[in-house]
Image (cartoon, rainbow, N blue to C red):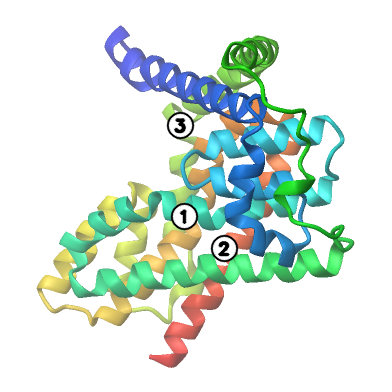
Amino acid sequence: MDIYQIWHGLGWPLVRLVFFISLGLLVGNLIESMNWTSAVARIAEPLVRLARLKDVSGASFSMAFFSGVSANTMLAEAYEKKEMTTRELLLSNLFNSLPTYFLHLPTVFFITLPFLKGAAVVYVGLTLLAAFLRTTGIIFLGRVWLPPIEAGCVPCRLKDTGRKSVRDALKKTWTRFLKRIPRIIYITVPIYILIFLSHRWGVFTALEDFLAHNAFFLKWLHPKAVSIIAFQMAAEFTAGLAVAGALLEAASLPAKQIVLALMVGNILSAPMRAFRHQFPYYAGIFSPKLALRLIVVNQSVRVGSLIVVALLYAWWG
């Protein structure tokens, strides 16, 4: 690898990652320092009540519509202060999957639309249904696993030490930022480098190729549909879309087979990519062990919901 490849493949993405983590950490700390958490939590109050989650979970849920890093920072701060249990943290992190999905929804839709045309609405609609299904399941688990929340409005129960001046809030924000950012950098940077090297050495490609070419359980799909999955896993989502678009344009496959192939490709490839992209910054915000647990649980629930929706679509169609 020359310097150009190292900078564009590792240096610049790592600088960008650390920058957005730092920005999210600053925003999360500022919101708490200015006592805006209660105002943010008010948006999610009905769902938080149903799920019996902590007040900060509602604030994190609302913040996840704008910044996943800031949302996770709120949860990490509350967990470190012993303000929520591990079970509450797991459910709260899962709870944020719906706003996180909406954060990326416009991008996903406008990427798929040129390739799939009308089928894009079906594909995106199925993934949206899976997101709602996950949220419904999390609310149910919260009502089963967690004790009833105390009476009164959700935002009112958040700690409020009175109005702070902007100067005091900024000072507190900066102090807490300086305390947390070194640990984040010390953990995130080595893990990101290790994952980058693993990618360069072909570890992830080998795993994805193995799944793509040994997926005996996909025999129910048309062989041309399996090619969409292979490209989606071996390259990236856009590559799978390009193959799907070409097959759809040539009328080689019905739209249903193409949508199902994209769903299966999503189920098989997304967990690996989620680990590759999320683990470095998750491990900086949470502990590496807890970060791995959160990602495994999150992706397991996500895959489960996609499988249910795909089966319903296959049966209903």
Q: What residue type is labelled 2?
A: Val
Q: What residue type is labelled 1?
A: Tyr
Q: Nearer the viewer, residue 148 or 158?
A: 158
Q: Nearer the viewer, residue 114 or 92?
A: 92
Q: Nearer the viewer, residue 10 or 87?
A: 87
Q: Earlier in the sequence, mark 2 or mark 3?
A: 3
The residue tagged 2 is 303
Q: Label 2 to label 3, Cα distance in Å?
A: 23 Å
Q: Answer left or right for 102 relative to 147.
A: left
Residue 105's x, y, as percent? 37, 56
Residue at image location 67% in from the left, 26% down from the top: 163
Tell me, yes or no, whether the two marked residues, 2 and 3, touch with CB atoms within 8 Å.
Answer: no
- Tell me, for residue 199, which label it has, or none: 3
Q: Nearer the viewer, residue 259 or 221?
A: 259
Q: Is 26 drawn above or below residue 245 in the view shown?
A: above
Residue at image location 51% in from the left, 69% down from the top: 130
Q: Label 1 to label 3, Cα distance in Å?
A: 26 Å
Q: Is 81 drawn above or below residue 18 in the view shown?
A: below
Residue 40's x, y, as percent? 59, 44
Residue at image location 60% in from the left, 49% down from the top: 61
The N terminus, quarter of image: top left
Residue at image location 61% in from the left, 56% down from the top: 44
Please identify, in this view, whether the residue under mark 1 or under mark 3 is nearer the observer: 1
The residue tagged 1 is 101
- Tell me, for residue 256, which label it has, or none: none
Residue 162's x, y, as percent? 73, 28
Q: Which amino acid does label 3 sit on?
A: His
**Residue 104 visible at all:** yes
**SS at circle 1:** helix
